[in-house]
Image (cartoon, helix red, strand yellow):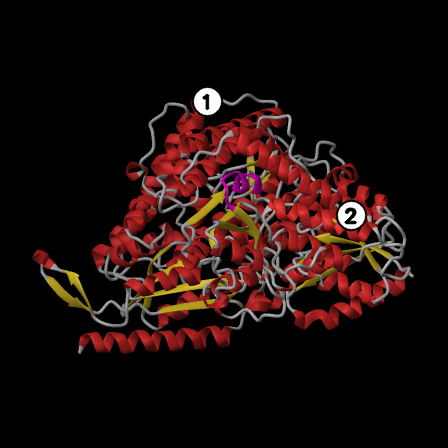
Amino acid sequence: MAEEQKKRKKRKTATKAAASIGPMVKESITSTIRAREEGKQKIAYTFIVCQHDEILRAMDIVPVWTENYSGICGAKRDAERFLQRAESLGFSRSLCTYALCGLGFDQWREELGEMPPDAPWGGQVRPDFMISSGQILCDPRSKWYQAAQQFMPDVPIYNIDLPYPLFDPKRDHREVWGYYHRYIVKELRGLVSFLEEQTGKKMDYDRLRELVDLGDRTWNLIHETYELRRAVPCPMGTGDAMNTMVPMCFMMGTQEAYDFYLDLNKELKEKIARGEGEVEEEKYRLLWGGGLPAWYALNDFNYFNSKGASFPAETTYRMVVPLYEMDIPETNDPIEHLAWRWLGYWTFWYEKARKRPGSEPDVERLIQYIEDYKIDGVVMHEAFSCRTWHVGLIWQLHQLAKIYKPIPVLVLGKEGKKEKKQRELPSLVLESDIIDITSYSEVDTRNKIDAFIETLESLRRARAA
Amino acid sequence: MNKQSKGMAKVERYYENYGSRARELSAEGKKVIGYVCSFAPLEMITASGCIPFRLRGDIHEPITKGDTLLETIVCPYYRSCFDLAVKHRYEFLSGMVIPHACDSMVRSFSVWSYSLNLPYFQFVNTPSVVKDSSFEFFNEELKTYKKSLEEFVGKKITDDDLAGAIQLHNENRNKARAVYEFRKPDPPLITGQELAKTLLACSSLPIEESNRLLDEVLEEVGQRKKSPLGKGPRILIDGACIDNAELAGLVEDLGASVVADTICNGSRDYWPKVDEKKPPIEALADRYLDKLNCPKTYRENKTGNFEEDIKARFADIGFTAKEFQVDGAIIYLYRYCDPFGFEVPARKAYYELIHVPLLHLEDLYSAGTIGQLRTRIQAFLEMIG
């Protein structure tokens, strides 16, 4: 395995910003090890997308994003030994492999009393406490740390329940979100109390307010920056976005994250001014329409690129929407605001979905991106071990096929005149896993990509004719 | 099919022709509301005048149409239920209630609702934690659920309606618990297959009919002087939804007796009752949030000690194992079951703690695996003697 890692070349990125992410992530892992050695700050295992980033930063907590570390093990093709260890403990391989990798790693570290041999990037440090999340988003987030307590029973857990109302075409979500908001506020305030107890420090609410404001500005900046990718040719694709998601998911509420997107914004504008695309000769514009990537096979994005395909947009890890377009109440209380931001994010597409019978929010989001980013085809990835992000994708493609039909359709064109338009939108579903490399076949994947590109090409020719 | 049959013969009829009574009632104009998981608050459905009906999958039916709409990484039991539903096995349904139980349910909610396109479809957002704030939230969520049913049936659900429904469902639970008593003799007076079929048949009937059926079963089995089984190891089945009698049949074919369970189609659902002294909504919140002991609900380890934590979390297993004097246990889970799957090592540790030998089986919800299961179970039974 180590030999293979040495031989593997670094993936070519289109932007300098994406290329800078590797060292940034490595430093963030190293900094947790440093923090453990220094012992001045408390260390928390936790998950992304919990609306608690600013709270953690305001309390000077060092977050260890456990999904991230498993992703690193996967990207370095070194997850298998941790997965096998988890299996030997009785966990099924069909469960979330992020969690399995983390559990296998933790059990090994606890057994040895030190990091497992050759732990990727120095390893994942033992936490002082764990913050899990019982969302309606992901079961493993609620179960992983509880399972980890078998090897770390002295490490306490705070489980934040963060629900949001599911989409109901017949009911306005705002009828119920008042009590959702009250509950989330209590959960977040409970988190603050837990952290105060664990750190022996009181929350500085002025600082929290500043960080929430910084977080809000970062949300908007990310949105504006990613919208630049509408340009033809597209200056940055999903391959790069799987790097540039790092500050968005792991560093929110920090100036470093904000500055990163300022730099990325500048870089993209410069590339657009130069007419420089992700690929030299852009032939097809694709949407990564769902599914977490196979972290050990990000080179597949370069393979797409080599065929003239670029990915101007993705739904995966685009975990922000513009605050100024959110329909949420104003408040000066930062905790209340975080709760509204959470609800505003998850219900962002509800209004649109209600207006189109038979649609739903995830489908509306796809339609919006398809139109805004001039998309020619949709690619999804079905990771076998994760139900959270990968159930419902087939159905979404079915819904899309009702709109993007393989026959010419009449649409409202310029000056309100009806025009005949070919809107067929081919799709491709790749299958493997987030970090379990045994589920992946490069040959099969690339054969599928080749066939998909041939379909796109024949459509392109038909349209040109 | 003899419509005059009683007791176990009637159980057999409803088990084999699952949904036949609900179909008749639907044809008479009654509204039948489907559910798949124990977290669906049934009392509310009964109080609204509708009939709760638990969907089953079918291990003998290959999943076909369902797989064209729903990913194969969904729990295979849930996929089978969905497959049968889209193949019109449950065409008599007027609606469905899907609770927040697991990712397979939550993430496929839209797929179910659009594919079946029933007049009523409701998600009940059950919290994942048990604390004051989650009770407050769940009370509100139950009111939303109540309102949705009121709009659907066009009439108010009063506190009296709810109290009446709670009483009926509690009666049902008492009677089901009484059937479990027949498992205590060695060998038991009721087989594992019979009990599984009884409870499954009951979950396909209106609550009053279910109560009458349980009375008949209690009377019939109560008259037995001799066990239908020979003396053999007494087995507890631990797991999630097991909606058929095949596993119990397999264990009993191999000379053991299934005498206890902690499954959703068994004691997990049938034993906890609603407190009739509390205001109805509050009492329902209490049962469905706290009393249902499902791994989906996170329960805090307050001791900082693993052994104490598992003693608290799995106390029901220990209590049942002792009460029914079990000689061994089988954890039977489906592939892709995250809530239970992450608990397997902790459950194994608990069984070690209470000195109950354990067999862990992960299955695919298919009749095709019965041969493999037979070999594993046979070896286990030989081991525990």
Where is residue B250? Give x, y as percent: 77, 66
**Residue A150 seen by the camera:** no
Q: Tell me the quarter of the picture where residue B237 sits.
A: bottom right
The answer to whether residue B214 is magenta is no
Q: Please state which of residues B202 and B245 is positioned toward the viewer in this rendering.
A: B202
Q: In the rendered structure, find residue A205 and report the number of the disc placed on it.
A: 1
The answer to whether residue B47 is magenta is yes
Find numbered disc 1 in the image and state the secondary structure of the residue it sits on.
helix
Going by the image, does B324 lie left or right of A103? right
Find numbered disc 2 in the image and state the secondary structure of the residue it sits on.
helix
Subunit that carries the residue with mark 2: B
Main secondary structure along the magenta-highlighted residues: helix
* Tag 2 residue: B180
Going by the image, does A370 lie left or right of A302? left
Indicate the amino acid at tag 1: Tyr
Going by the image, does A389 lie left or right of B57? left
The stretch of residues the image draws in magenta is B42-50
Where is residue A245? Give x, y as percent: 42, 50
Query: Marks 2 and 1, how far apart in space?
Result: 56 Å
**Quadrant location of the C terminus of chain A?**
bottom left
Where is residue B6? Give x, y as percent: 70, 56
Image: A350 above or below B226:
above
